[in-house]
Image: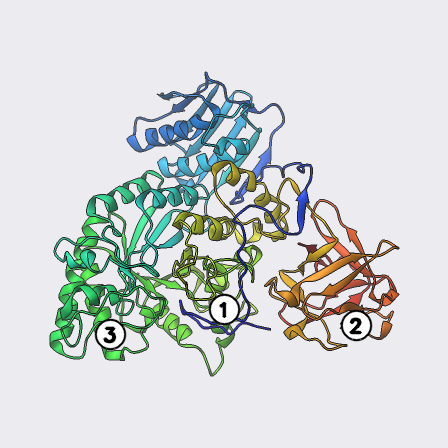
Amino acid sequence: MRWLHRRGRRLAALASVVLTLPLLPATVSQAAAAPPAPAPYALVPRPVSQQAVAGKGFTLTPHTRIAVLSKTPAVVGVGSYLSRLLSPATGYTLPVVRDTRAQKNAVVLDPHGPKSLGAEGYTLSSGKNGVVVRAHGAEGLFRGVQTLRQLLPAAVESPTGQSRQWTVSPVRISDSPRYPYRGVMLDVARRFYPVSQIKRYIDQAAAYKINTLHLHLTDDQGWRIAIDAIPNLTKVGASTQSGFTGGTDWYYTAKEYKEIVAYAKSRFVTVVPEVDGPGHTQAALASVPGLNCDDKAKPPYSGFDVGISLYCMKDKQHTANMTRFLTTVIEAVAKLTPGPYIHLGGDETPQATPEQYAAYAKAATSATTTRHKTVMGWHQLGQATVPSGSLMQFWGEEDDRESIGTADETESIAFVRNGVAQGATFVMSPSDHAYLDMKYDVSTPYGLSWSGYVPVQKSYEWDPATSTAKPDGTGSIVPAGQIAGVEAALWADRAYEGSNELPTPNTHWPEPYVYSDYMSFPRLPAIAEVGWTPQSSRDWKNFRQRLAQQGPRWTAAGIGYYAAPGVPWPGTVTVVEGAHSVETGGKALDNPGGSTSDGTGLVVWGPNRGGNQTWTFTRQSDDTYTLTNKTSGKCAEVADGSTSAGATVVQRACDGSTGQRWKVTPLGADDEYTIASARSGLLLTAASATDGAQVIQQTDSGSALQRWTIG
């Protein structure tokens, strides 16, 4: 029933076969239909405040100007960015004019807003005469521009000319972020991304107000940044990727890295370089013999295992070798990186003794602070002494949260406690919510599921404030004031089709951007809203309506997204008859363990879209449906034909009786249904929204756990 969780970026054998699917924005259970009316102001992330305004909206014309109320280069740059953004689809070359006052028929960018807006806050107002975006500086204007583009028709994202009217609805918006750090990590070490594809990802992320790009530059499978003083790091260490050998240019020169940093800066995105250690270091060990205990270089590694490497620290000489190496590398990377952070890794080193780990931490943190950079690392770095104000990245999962306050707290929780005590702040990246390489469900062609399946609802329904709290949300280890923000992480060690198994010569490896598109969208916008929008303003039902309206934008922009079930994407409608997953409260109707026995009680569990969660709806002559489980071939019915509230729902051999028939009633625009027993008239109900909760029949109470999506 549950996957065997293996924490960290470890490999896990999966119990079912991954199906190879076309990377198209469509779902099995959906069919073409007239597009529904767009959700009003379908903005992602949801602003803090938005209000419709009476009157006409503002329509862009070839004569519209972008008026920048400043001569500051950064502010003028936002105006130029907006002009370039609008030009391909509209065909307009909107001039950017520098002025000191607002103008009619213009998009006005005013950087003189109140200081209370902060660096990223903004206001936006639109009416028939124009649009005004006001902020306290260029960065806030840029965030406001991302909202403005979502107020325009989806076709504005197209790279080619579109014939239509470009009208911004009349609205007033006031907005600012919940957390200052909102990041995404790209694993360029396991799978090399060309510079052009990194820029593409920066643009995609910045559109949802992500402000940090964490580049995982080094690992066992590759070293991706040139260090002039140690040329072998790229000559040897960059010759491999997961599944590939023989590379000669799978790295970034200093010039290319600066190009990435500058491009990110133009989108108000800070680059965080990661030099991992003391494990995940095979590429370095293959390049620098003195980092090995026998002073012989290791062979370059192109495999998929984890936990295979460690800097040699068995004696003073080799510890000194490591220290010199780290000092050289970190100094070079720091010179190339204007941002405040250097990420030092620190994860997955089971073979390191406490003394060895402490030696690594001392050498790496000293080299970082000497260059006036802030130390960043995975939460395991908390086991060592770190400077106060360091930034830890927590990627723990359900098992860690469940252990809090017990006699068996996990090591991860212990390391977090140590980090908090040393004055560290934390970025939350729980693997069971924020790891974009986790499969959506059993049919996902890429990635793994050692932290469970992560459908889009699960990537949205979590709170950074309780990431290190008990399952009931209490007892948070990290105080609210020590949470810096969130980060989505996209690992790339299984970026190929059929990723449950090791690749073969016939394995299909898509371009890195194809993998990134599919695994990031729609989950990256979900995590972006987690980091931006106040917790009190977030609601899955509302979000999925707004998210659906992003689909046409991604299509226009050429993003090959996954049209996740449970989201009412425009142009599709659920067809009840056929095979579906049936979900409520983020859980799916489940035949536990894939039982084939009569009388097995049905439960709800985290969605995986496997056979035990697939139900075939077959229409009957009286317009009711039978629900047949794919794995067992048995039908859902109320136990013993009971008509009493609270009776359990079980599976039994299909016999066509009234007790196995269910009336499915749509609930309107929310794309939800009630499912009522034809025998009792009572509703199919989940007893709770926890894994393993019984499914019963109950009177209609309006409960959310009586409302089901069929997808």
Q: Is mark 1 on a helix, strand or loop?
A: loop
Amino acid type at image mark 1: Ala
- Work out which residue is located at the far top of the displayed protein and give it: 63
Residue 112: image location, x then y, percent: 38, 31
User: Could you tell me which residue is drawn at 48 percent across and 65 percent down?
Assistant: 500
First reached walking from the N terminus: tag 1 or tag 2: 1
Vertical relation: 316 (above or below) 74: below
SS state under label 2: loop
- Closest to the camera, between mark 2 and mark 3, is 2
Quadrant placement of the N terminus: bottom right
The residue where tag 1 is placed is 469
What's the amino acid at mark 3?
Ala
Label pair 1/3, CB-CB below 8 angstroms = no
Left or right side of 699 for 267? left
* Quarter containing the C terminus: bottom right
- Secondary element under disc 3, as helix, strand or loop, is helix
**To which quarter of the image does residue 70 belong?**
top left
Q: Vertical placement of 622 versus 128: above or below?
A: below
Residue 595, position as x, y percentages in the image: 68, 75
Judge the density around disc 2: few (<14), some (14-19), many (≥20) Cα neighbours within 10 Å.
some
Query: In the figure, 156 relative to 537: above or below?
Result: above
Mark 2 or mark 3, which has the lower sequence index?
3
Q: What residue type is labelled 2?
A: Ala
From the viewer's side, name the closer residue of 90 and 516.
516
Q: How crowded is mark 1: few (under 14 residues within 10 Å), some or many (20 or more)?
A: many
First in residue order: circle 1 vs circle 3: 3
Q: Is the residue marked by circle 3 packed among few (<14), some (14-19), or many (20+) residues within 10 Å?
A: some
The answer to whether residue 700 is seen in the rendering is: no
Report the Cα–Cα distance between label 2 and label 3: 61 Å
Is residue 500 in view from this perspective? Answer: yes
Query: Which residue in the protein does label 2 denote?
Result: 653
Residue ID for mark 3: 358
